[in-house]
Amino acid sequence: MQEQLKTVARRLKSAGKICVLTGAGISKESGIPTFREAQTGLWANFDAERLATIQGYLADPPLVWQWYDTRRVGIADTQPNAGHYALVELESMIPSVVIITQNIDGLHAKAGSRDIIELHGSILKYRCFDAGHPQSDVAAGLKEPPQCRCGSMLRPDVVWFGEALPQEALERAFQEVGSADVVLVVGTSGLVQPAASLPDHGARNGAFIVEVNPEETPITEIADCLLQGLSGTVLPRLIAEMKE
Ligand code: BV8
């Protein structure tokens, strides 16, 4: 690992632009279960990919509302971890660092990252189902979706399976990755599209691809280097190596 860290540190130090694609794994050491683990306890017998859909919501608004409310309450007092903070420090060392996250937990912003693209929205925000009116101050513990002032029921402002990602965010993500010198891929299983196609797009445009994950994923085969380990350990070691 030490030799790999030196190689990656050298690449990062000479980079003009770095994109960092993050997934649920970077927030795991903050105590937020990864997406597939999130189905524990009360939710163990529900399929996330069924709950996180328009159909799932319309079939049972109270159930899906409570699932998101439970997750939001669980996220509310979590803090960024050393991995998030290492990325903030990277921003002070490199001319351009763009964080492209699949996470909806808001921890990159909480850590102080400045240029963040949220591909899948934010669990901290709501909008109404029919007109998309934004709504932020929603009480916790409600048993069913409250109504918007326009009469439509509220929904979490996240991207559900089967829904298009926010056009501007997706276009910018591909554009940034397509012109990056290095793409760090941190804590994602590389299964959810179209986010999972970003590293390959970067590779096709000449970017050096570095994966940070304790396990191999479909991204590993197109990565130039897999730093196998926890992001809360690997990313700070990378920053330390860059200061050598
Ligand atoms: C869309 C918000 C089309 C909700 C989420 C091909 C092309 C296009 C679409 C598809 C396609 N094939 C299939 C699809 C459909 C679908 C899809 O990708 N399905 C998958 C399951 C096959 N995609 C969609 O539906 C997308 N929409 O394409 O629409 C369209 C176009 C036009 C018009 C209409 C429609 C929408 C996808 C977004 C879904 N919403 N989240 C919510 O959270 O409730 S995605 C959700 O899953 C999370 O946001 C998260 O991003 C994702 C899970 O992925 P990961 O983040 O990778 O997390 P995971 O748990 O899987 O992995 C964690 C990793 O961390 C692991 O590798 C682990 O080893 C590692 N790890 C653990 N600990 C650590 C660590 N790493 C580092 N350090 C550690 N300590």
Image (spheres, rainbow, N blue to C red):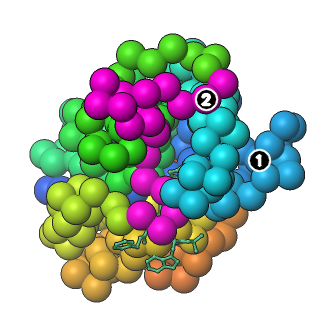
Judge from the rendering whether residue 229 lies leftward or rightward of residue 186; answer left or right.
Answer: right
Three-letter code for the amino acid on which mark 2 is drawn: Glu
Judge from the rendering whether residue 208 lies leftward or rightward of residue 169; answer left or right.
Answer: right
What's the magenta region? Answer: 143-163
Between residues 193 and 222, which one lies in front from this camera angle? 193
Camera sees residue 6: no
- Seen in the picture, residue 234 relative to 223 is either above or below; the reply is above
Q: Is residue 6 magenta?
A: no
The residue singled out by tag 1 in the image is 39
Q: Residue at x 29, y 42 (%)?
A: 132
Residue 140: numbered disc: none
Q: Position of residue 107 (x, y in %)?
A: 44, 30
Q: Position of residue 186 (x, y in %)?
A: 49, 54
Res. 216 image quadrant? bottom right
Image quadrant holding the N terminus, namely bottom right
SS of the residue under disc 1: loop
- Seen in the picture, residue 135 relative to 94 is either above or below; the reply is above
Judge from the rendering whether residue 194 lies leftward or rightward of residue 45; answer left or right.
Answer: left
Q: Residue at x 86, y 52 (%)?
A: 45
- Seen in the picture, residue 217 relative to 140 is either above or below; the reply is below
Camera sees residue 215: yes
Q: Position of residue 57 (x, y in %)?
A: 58, 50
Three-letter code for the amino acid on which mark 1 is drawn: Gln
The crowd level at tag 1 (other Cα within 10 Å; few <14, some 14-19, many 20+) is some
The crowd level at tag 2 (other Cα within 10 Å; few <14, some 14-19, many 20+) is some
Between residues 41 and 9, which one lies in front from this camera angle? 41
Q: Name the dominant secondary structure of the magenta segment.
A: loop
Q: Mark 1 vs mark 2: which is more N-terminal?
A: 1
The residue singled out by tag 2 in the image is 144
